[in-house]
Amino acid sequence: MFLEFSGAAQEVTGSCHLLHVGDRTILLDCGLFQGKRSESRARNERLPARPNRIDAVILSHAHIDHAGRLPFLVREGYDHAIHATAATRDLCAIMLADSANIQVKDAEWLSRRQRAHAEPLYEPDDVTRTLKLMEGHPYDRWFDVVPGVRAKFVEAGHILGSASVVVEVTDGGTTRRLVFSGDVGRSGLAIIRDPQPPLDADADAVILESTYGDRDHSAIDDARAELGRVVRETAKRGGKVIIPAFAVGRVQELVYDLHVLARAGEIPALPIYVDSPLATSATHVFEAHPECFDRNEDLVRAVDKLFRFDLVRYTRDVQESKGLNALRGPMVIISPSGMAESGRVLHHLANAVSDARNTILVVGFMAEHTLGRRIVERQATLRILGDEYPLAAQVEILNGYSAHGDRGELQRWLDAVRRGSPRLRTVYLVHGEAGAQASFAARLRAAGYAVEIPAPGDRHPL
């Protein structure tokens, strides 16, 4: 029994880890690498193992950096089960289809620009075949993965359907348990339930994300109040608030909080546009899974329609999206992608960044080499869609909206796992940039943990 680390090892994207048990291989996630186009393309084409040697996939959640290579895996010949929660399966139906369309369009663009044929990583038919392999499981119930291996999902509190995974392996009379954190959310996030550490895991090892292992977030309630402040101040200037946001999770959180603020009279009655077919479809999936909602929240108890109120409007049509840039006066435009690397938000940013009345509101992690990171750094000139724009708009950063736990929250989650795992030997830090991982490792070692920061290709016995 051993672990092999492939993606999100000493970096953030491309989550993918392998569990080898005898002659069986199980993938934990199979995500897309994101960042510089040329580098990520080459890496995404290298699967962690031959598809015919992989016996099962366990998926923590639907974000593309965790699920985005599944259709490529299937295209290359994988035909076994993909285990996920029911909500993750339903979100993958729309997110992977969207990713496939992007793959096809990118390939067409590259073929025209380079005057050479470029294959998409996968196409819509590959997504259809992938979804047929997905098996939805409830939380907190064991299911069989392969002979000698069973697993269960535990609420991770990151996005709808997200899970940490407990895997139990029996081989040659020896039983070991592994906990894979997936992405751990924050207590008090809007809509979804709080993270539930697997208290009875009895784990030998933990694979733990470390995205924000070097910092603390502001309070979640402060984020809502700050959102209200930004909207009020921008509206007073007559400007627009442009929010690059992940279509799944972050968009719904923002609409939820704007709903709360509007009901309380804490923002003016200005139009709020959710400009994204994907975000609109994702909202429908949220509405189909109220069993995942946190029933302790006031708005969840007070209204039936969390994401639909008088001020909010959802746009699917391209022409309607383009028309938003011709509108004047205060408004909020929420549009993917979350790191401002693609999608309709690029057109809104190009239209807005050079006007000092406007605000670019950053509400999530921005990876290196992305336009979002350059906005966070407040670079004087931004390159958007091939053109240069001076940055004159206000830039506001609300870290309280992060769906990832900060260093304190991650350690408290891990401490809870350790209390139920007297034989815990090693914590493997993944899904983090070098500085965050080094800082978090030092913190955990000071608390008595044995910590490893595996590199791609590293193997460790379980």
Image (cartoon, rainbow, N blue to C red):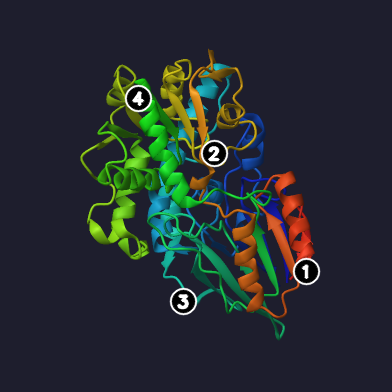
Vertical relation: 8 (above or below) 18: above
Q: Are marks 1 and 4 in contact (CB under 8 Å)?
A: no
Dot in front, 4 or 3: 4
Kind of residue sitting beneath label 3: Arg
Identify the residue under disc 1.
Answer: 448
| Residue closest to the eye, 379 or 238 | 238
Q: Is residue 337 left or right of residue 232?
A: right
Which mark is first along the chain, 2 or 4? 2
- Disc 1 element: loop
Dot in front, 2 or 1: 1
The residue drawn where x is 59% and y is 65% is 55
Kind of residue sitting beneath label 2: Leu
- Return the mark for residue 236: 4
- Disc 2 element: loop
Residue 53 appears in view: no
The residue drawn where x is 33% and y is 21% is 322
Dot in front, 4 or 2: 4
Which quarter of the figure is the N terminus placed in? bottom right
Dot in front, 3 or 2: 3
Identify the residue under disc 2.
Answer: 121
Label 3 crowding class (10 Å Cα cut-off): few <14, some 14-19, many 20+?
few
Identify the residue under disc 3.
Answer: 141
Label 2 crowding class (10 Å Cα cut-off): few <14, some 14-19, many 20+?
many
Which mark is first along the chain, 4 or 1? 4
Q: Position of residue 95 (x, y in %)?
A: 43, 45
Q: CA distance from mark 4 to mark 3?
A: 52 Å
Q: Position of residue 276 (x, y in %)?
A: 36, 35
Q: Hey, which residue is sitting farthest bottom in the picture? A: 173
Kind of residue sitting beneath label 1: Gly
Vertical relation: 93 (above or below) 180: above
